[in-house]
Amino acid sequence: MARFGDSKDNHYKNGCNNMAHHKSAEKRIRQTESRTEINRARVSRIRTFIKRVEKAIESGSYTDAQKAFKDAQPEIMRGVTKGVIKLGTASRKVSRLSARVKALSTAA
């Protein structure tokens, strides 16, 4: 005997207990799952770029840090455009990274 939630169809994919009763609701569930996957990848990519800058700063190389920062800045702002992070958050991250890179230039 099948238990509640043991259905073979996609209503319970990945432990999700959304049970849509309309075609449009089923479609929204599918769209949400795919958007969530894309957004998670985007946030992960932003974090990776930030980590590259931080690693370059720790190494003490101003040119490497500057290059990594120039690569990271558009990626962070793209996150704002795509709606995965807020403008204030992105601006703060860019500003703090910029200050740390600039501090390397004065120290070197």
Image: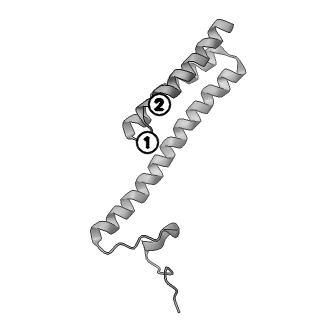
Among the 4 quarters of the image, the one containing residue 59: top right
For image coordinates 34% across by 68% down, the residue present is 26
Q: Is residue 26 left or right of residue 62?
A: left
Residue labelled with disc 1: 84
For image coordinates 52% across by 36% down, the residue present is 46
Q: Amino acid at mark 1?
A: Val
Among the 4 quarters of the image, the one containing residue 64: top right
Q: Which is nearer the N-term, disc 2 or disc 1?
A: 1
Total labels: the figure holds 2
Residues packed near mark 2 inside 10 Å, few (<14), some (14 to 19) or many (20 plus) = some
Q: Is residue 9 left or right of residue 67?
A: left
Q: Amino acid at mark 2?
A: Ala
In the image, which disc is placed on residue 98?
Answer: none
Percent x, y of residue 38: 45, 49
Percent x, y of residue 51: 62, 32
Of the 4 image quadrants, the one containing the C terminus is top right
Mark 2–mark 1 Cα distance, whole angstroms, equals 10 Å
Residues packed near mark 1 inside 10 Å, few (<14), some (14 to 19) or many (20 plus) = some
For image coordinates 61% across by 20% down, the residue present is 65
For image coordinates 28% across by 71% down, the residue present is 23
The answer to whether one can see residue 108 in this image is no
Residue labelled with disc 2: 90
Q: Is residue 3 above or below residue 28?
A: below
Percent x, y of residue 37: 47, 53
Mark 2 element type: helix
Percent x, y of residue 53: 60, 26
Q: Is residue 76 above or below residue 28?
A: above
